[in-house]
Amino acid sequence: MAEKTNLDQYKGFVKERLKSLLNVVQSVSLGDLSVKIEPPEEKDEFTALSIELERMINGLIETNRVSEERMARLQAVVEEKERLLETVRELSSPVIQVWENVLVMPLIGAIDSARATRIMEDLLTGITKYQAEIVIIDITGVPVVDTRVANHLIQTIKAAGLLGAKCVVVGISSEVAQSLISLGVDLSGVITRSNLQAGIRYAMEMAGLEVVPKKRER
Amino acid sequence: MTETFQVKVAAEAHVYVAAHQVKALARQMGFNEADQTRLETVTSELARNIVLYAGEGAIQVQVITQGKRRGLEIQALDNGPGISDVEQAMEDGYTTSGGLGSGLGGAKRMTDEFHIESAPGRETRVTAIKWLQEQ
């Protein structure tokens, strides 16, 4: 009978130990790594298992820490990139006063909706600030002019017109011109000149000015 | 030379990535400047349609051959609402988004082969091919 009792005791002990370990494993699989494994009072068959389990949990904690650090670094890089992009955006549509009432806006880089909105705002602000009557928009640096970009451009020109400023578009390359024709984009209402120089000459004419060679004094 | 690639399109920035890569490939293949710009613009139109109407999709590009001639095939794929009337969508001036509305018709004029496989509720596949002129 004594043997039977011993066996029962042992079974009870195994059940107890398994249960406590199972609790730990369940917590871990639910994502809770803060569980502590109670160290057995004396060495038994479960000691090695407990130790390994603890090592595994510590490994997981370390992995989590490393990936959190990595995420934080990535996040910082992304934020830095955003800031740089913002700077680039600001720099990529400057409004420059080249003469009284004459502005030049060189556009460089792809134009998406966000930029298009910004370009329009910057230009309208510039027109009001400098009381501009003529704006030269240089699109030499715009890589793709599709229907959407052309549409943004036309909207901007219309808005400038409402403020009393006339826009001249310069820098349409022969390739872009051919694409625009194929796309059926109607730019007939838009004043265009081949390059910035021609645009400035046009602006001067409109302002009643002319550029003449300096007279040499003898 | 990368003869085939795919660009995931889910934001406006991807439109330019796709267009830029297509232009680079067209240049490598020996297309002249005007055709490079056409292919770039076609890609831009197709990718932009994905962003505007489907939200996300992909641009698949591959170099194709037919006999001796080589060409560039641009495919735009998406699982958006689809185009209910393909013929109408190709007409100049047709738009449901407030654009100039000549994007698809223009893309067709700028390429040698152009077709749209679409029906509401099914995957939309727009294929545009431009052949390299024999020198």
Image (cartoon, rainbow, N blue to C red):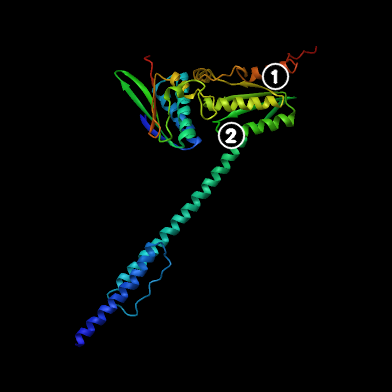
Residue A60 position (above or below residue B84): below
Q: Secondary structure at mark 2?
A: helix
Name the chain under label 1: A
Q: Image point 43% across, 58% down: which residue?
A: A64
Q: Report the residue marked by disc 1.
A: A203
Residue A200 position (above or below residue A116): above
Whether residue A167 is visible, yes or no, is yes
Name the chain under label 2: A
Q: Residue furthest bottom?
A: A2
Residue A6 position (above or below residue A24): below
Quarter in which the C terminus of chain A is drawn: top right
Q: Secondary structure at mark 1?
A: helix
Which one is earlier in the sequence, the residue at label 1 or at label 2?
2
Q: Mark 2 is on which residue type? A: Arg
Image spot of residue B116 (x, y percent): 39, 26
**Looking at this view, is B10 or B104 the one in front?**
B104
Q: Image point 20% across, 84% down: which residue?
A: A4
Q: Image point 39% across, 66% down: which residue?
A: A27
Q: Residue furthest right?
A: A218
Mark 2 neighbour density, 10 Å: few (under 14) some (14–19) many (20 or more): some
As measured in the structure, the alpha-carbon distance from the residue carrying label 1 to the one carrying label 2 is 26 Å
A34 relative to A168 in the view: left or right? left
Residue A211's label in the rendered image is none
Q: Image point 67% across, 19% down: which residue?
A: A200
Q: Residue furthest top?
A: A218
Q: Report the residue marked by disc 2.
A: A115
Q: Mark 1 is on which residue type? A: Ala
